[in-house]
Image: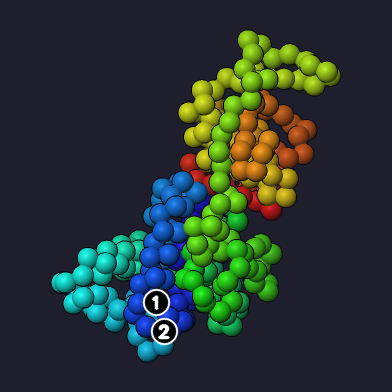
Amino acid sequence: MDMYINDLSFQGQCDDYEKAMEAVNQLANTINITKVMRGHSPVKRTRELKYSLICPDKTIHDFLFWLYEEAKHSSICRDILTKVQVNLMQGPFLNLGELDESKDNLVAPCGELIKNSSIHAAISHECSSIPAVISAVNSVGFDNVAFTLDGYDKKIINLVSTECFTPYLRIYEPNPKHDIIVSKIVGGKVHSKMDLAPEEAKKILDNGICIEDKNIIFAYHNECWYQFPAHLKCKFHCFPIGTPTNDTNINRITKEVGHPPYPNNGYKIIS
């Protein structure tokens, strides 16, 4: 899953640099906890992000230079300085020439056009998943776990804290009923033999496609489909289902995101 820092969420909402440090710390923690969700790929951003307002009359760039001076005698400021440099100033940067011009005039929840923003990139570069952004805390229009745009038919995942990530956790727990020598029928239902080690199952779970409205994850591995039902919240077990031609869920996935194989770029979610 590609993930982007939402530049439109920096609206000068921090009253002072102390509040700005708290906001940057929360943003950095959110970025850090989403590593598996985005397949350990870097979070992308616009080159102009550094000129976004973090305080009413101060940009992220202004804040950075203040931190340079304060870091000379403050370990806390040194830590925040590093987080600003790594998470807000460095690349990878978006290539604005690759954005979908047909979406230029869509309006973000904050009231601004999305043109040339990270939201614009998120909905231009969809890859087998609902798009996702990471937003600064306390920004107008971006205080919910997801938002929509008029003229765009998918929701956009909006992560503003580490707690926002919790519902998306994927924990693998093997089910003993699939730890059998051969597949068998029990009570009229097929219990398929699990043929993956737990470590391998967890890896393909983390790259699987979640059908969000059913809370089931599917993954394609070694020319075979695997199904991960949730037996508890955020906890999944697994069994192979082969290559079915009449499974409504598989048909839905292939219709929406295409046929396998799929990139190993972290979570994929369809609604």
Look at 56% across and 52% down and name the residue there: 166
Look at 66% across and 62% down and name the residue there: 154
Label 1 is placed on what type of residue? Lys
Task: Indicate which disc residue 15 carries.
Answer: 2
Task: Indicate which disc residue 144 carries.
Answer: none
Cβ–Cβ below 8 Å for labels 1 and 2?
yes
Look at 24% across and 75% down and name the residue there: 67
Asked whether the viewer can see residue 224, the reply is: no
Q: Alpha-carbon neighbours of circle 2 within 10 Å: few (<14), some, or many (≥20)?
A: few
Q: Quadrant of residue 217?
A: top right
Q: Which residue ends up furthest to the top in the rendered image? A: 181
Q: Is residue 92 above or below residue 22?
A: above
Task: Indicate which disc residue 19 carries.
Answer: 1
Q: Nearer the viewer, residue 33 or 205?
A: 33
Per the model, the C-alpha gap separating discs 1 and 2 is 6 Å
Asked whether the viewer can see residue 136, the reply is: yes
> Under tag 2, what secondary structure?
loop
Q: Alpha-carbon neighbours of circle 1 within 10 Å: few (<14), some, or many (≥20)?
A: some
Residue 252, position as x, y percentages in the image:
72, 44
Q: Is residue 237 above or below residue 31?
A: above
> Under tag 1, what secondary structure?
helix
Residue 71, position as x, y percentages in the image:
20, 71
Residue 96, position as x, y percentages in the image:
43, 70
Look at 49% across and 57% down and name the residue there: 162
